[in-house]
Image (spheres, grey):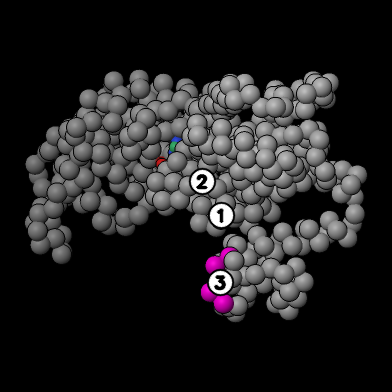
């Protein structure tokens, strides 16, 4: 949704613009001066801010600086009184998009808004659209980094051949996703994709899990059992955590890879294996070969086509597109609408070290979805350990602490503004419940109650049925 914030101290003019824009299907909010607009921008992202130049408290140029200092993604266009063109030009030099003159001409206004909207979509698409492998399918993979793009190409190539593949990478880098993508891009796509986690099955059971067993093959084997190699016939067998297999099993796997056949436990009949094998590991197999825990011959058999999935911290440019991918995904799952992510939150996520890679990023976004009360993921909705441990770019932090403009340089007043806003946000987040809010905001309950009274805040406005001490 392309939402617009109209900022003007003249109510009639605001109403006129509002009528024109809403009749064209835009979602429009109003602010009565720059200061009011700044508060609204903190709670919601507006792709376009249409703002008057001369206003009390914070004027149009100050609002422009405010928006730029915070790196909000809003475009600003000015509404100028006839004869004040010089100010408008100055503002354009400072980064404003364009201006319209008062009195407002409907066609000129619409034309400006449409141009701004087109520019916004262009920038937005450039920033966030990334190559997608198998769009719309369960194996949809996102990546615009060079390394991911070359992996996508590789996946498509590997789909056309039948060799075994070894996928390597840290936890959560997408090894299983890539294995599935290879399968679904191959002629075997209508056959089964069977995944076995070699680390999760005990050594005594794994052989029969993989190759099956005959009735009476061992104590407790009272029925014939079909193994995964048979299940996967005509399809792909994904051997996850291959580095955790025992030397005995490694010998048997090597045989399947070489001869394309195997013998179920307790049988003397050989069975043909019509499977493609994709293996994955996060272990350093070269070191495992050196210390004797992994067979070198098996390694060479598997490693015909190696794929290395880079860790997320090494492909920072994939973080924003992945976040947007997960926002779309969770919007469907949670029937909630998050439209964007604030620059502060994005910055924190881009500068985190992601030991759990994409899976961890996905969890962080889901956390924010649950906690966030606005339509934008903000810094404060991120998991605490990420907020504390992200090495954020300092330019934004510096901008955040830049001194407010001259009229607002009143310590007591600004402190009160902050306190009030903090408490309102905290109450919103915890549905007006006093005990939880006090605890989560790390604030003594009495202090919270005192401030609520002082600022005349009503917890019932934020979801509490009555003053609730939950
Ligand atoms: N490029 C990508 N685009 C979109 N989603 C991705 C991408 N890579 C991984 N994911 C998602 O991240 C999560 C983790 O991926 P996956 O399970 O494939 O990782 P893994 O390497 O097998 O992890 P582990 O080593 O912990 O088993 C999944 O939900 C997957 O869909
Ligand atoms: Mg996995």
For the residues labelled 3 and 1, the Cα–Cα distance comes to 17 Å
For the C terminus, give its image quadrant.
Answer: bottom right
Numbered disc in front, either 3 or 1? 3
Disc on res. 189: none
Callout 2: 10 Å neighbours few (<14), some, many (20+)? some
Q: Compared with residue 84, is residue 401 higher up or lower down, i.e. above or below?
A: below
Disc 1 secondary structure class: loop
| Along the line of sight, the residue nearer the viewer: 98 or 362 | 98
Q: Compared with residue 144, is residue 66 higher up or lower down, i.e. above or below?
A: below
| Along the line of sight, the residue nearer the viewer: 182 or 83 | 83
Q: Is residue 384 left or right of residue 22?
A: right
Magenta segment range?
A: 462-466
Q: Is residue 463 magenta?
A: yes
Callout 3: 10 Å neighbours few (<14), some, many (20+)? some
Disc 2 secondary structure class: loop
Instruction: Look at the image and tell me whether residue 299 can be seen.
Output: no
| Along the line of sight, the residue nearer the viewer: 14 or 173 | 14
Residue at x-position 56% and y-position 72%: 464
Query: Are dots 1 and 2 in contact, CB under 8 Å?
Result: yes
| Of pointers 2 and 3, the one earlier in the residue sequence | 2
Helix, strand or loop: magenta stretch: loop
| Of pointers 1 and 2, the one earlier in the residue sequence | 2
Locate residue 97, reporting x and y percent. Answer: 69, 24
Locate residue 455, reporting x and y percent. Answer: 75, 68
Residue topped by disc 3: 464
| Along the line of sight, the residue nearer the viewer: 244 or 278 | 278
Residue topped by disc 1: 372
Residue at x-position 77% and y-position 71%: 454
Locate residue 69, reporting x and y percent. Answer: 77, 37
Q: Is residue 412 magenta?
A: no
């Amino acid at each position: 949704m392309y939402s617009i914030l109209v900022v003007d101290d003249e109510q009639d003019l605001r109403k006129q613009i509002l009528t024109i824009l809403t009749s064209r299907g835009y979602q429009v909010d109003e602010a009565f001066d720059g200061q009011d607009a700044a508060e609204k921008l903190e709670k919601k992202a507006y792709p376009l801010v249409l703002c008057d130049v001369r206003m009390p408290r914070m004027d149009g140029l100050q609002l422009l600086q405010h928006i730029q200092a915070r790196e909000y993604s809003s475009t600003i266009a000015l509404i100028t009184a006839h004869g004040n063109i010089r100010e408008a030009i100055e503002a354009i030099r400072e980064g404003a998009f364009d201006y319209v003159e008062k009195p407002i001409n409907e066609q000129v206004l619409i034309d400006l808004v449409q141009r701004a909207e087109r520019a916004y979509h262009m920038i937005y698409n450039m920033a966030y659209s990334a190559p997608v492998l198998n769009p719309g399918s369960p194996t949809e993979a996102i990546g615009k980094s060079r390394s991911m793009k070359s992996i996508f190409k590789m996946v498509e190539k590997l789909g056309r051949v039948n060799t075994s593949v070894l996928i390597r990478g840290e936890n959560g880098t997408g090894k299983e996703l890539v294995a599935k993508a290879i399968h679904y891009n191959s002629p075997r796509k209508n056959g089964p994709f069977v995944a076995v986690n070699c680390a999760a099955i005990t050594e005594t059971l794994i052989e029969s899990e993989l190759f099956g067993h005959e009735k009476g093959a061992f104590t407790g084997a009272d029925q014939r059992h079909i193994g995964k190699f048979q299940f996967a016939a005509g399809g792909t067998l994904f051997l996850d955590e291959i580095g955790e297999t025992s030397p005995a099993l490694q010998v048997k796997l090597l045989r399947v890879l070489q001869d394309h056949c195997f013998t179920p436990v307790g049988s003397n009949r050989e069975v043909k294996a019509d499977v493609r094998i994709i293996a994955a590991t996060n272990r350093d197999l070269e070191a495992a070969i050196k210390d004797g825990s992994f067979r070198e011959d098996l390694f060479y058999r598997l490693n015909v086509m190696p794929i290395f999935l880079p860790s997320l911290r090494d492909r920072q440019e994939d973080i924003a597109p992945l976040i947007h991918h997960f926002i779309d995904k969770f919007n469907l799952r949670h029937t909630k609408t998050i439209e964007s992510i604030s620059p502060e939150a994005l910055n924190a996520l881009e500068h985190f070290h992601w030991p759990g890679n994409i899976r961890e990023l996905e969890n962080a976004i889901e956390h924010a979805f649950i906690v966030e009360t606005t339509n934008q993921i903000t810094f404060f909705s991120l998991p605490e350990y990420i907020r504390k441990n992200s090495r954020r770019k300092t330019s934004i932090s510096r901008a955040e602490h830049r001194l407010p403009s001259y009229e607002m340089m009143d310590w007591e007043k600004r402190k009160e503004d902050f306190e009030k806003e903090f408490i309102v946000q905290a109450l919103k987040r915890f549905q007006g419940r006093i005990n939880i809010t006090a605890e989560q905001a790390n604030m003594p309950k009495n202090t919270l109650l005192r401030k609520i009274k002082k600022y005349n805040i009503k917890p019932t406005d934020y979801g509490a049925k009555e003053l609730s001490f939950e």
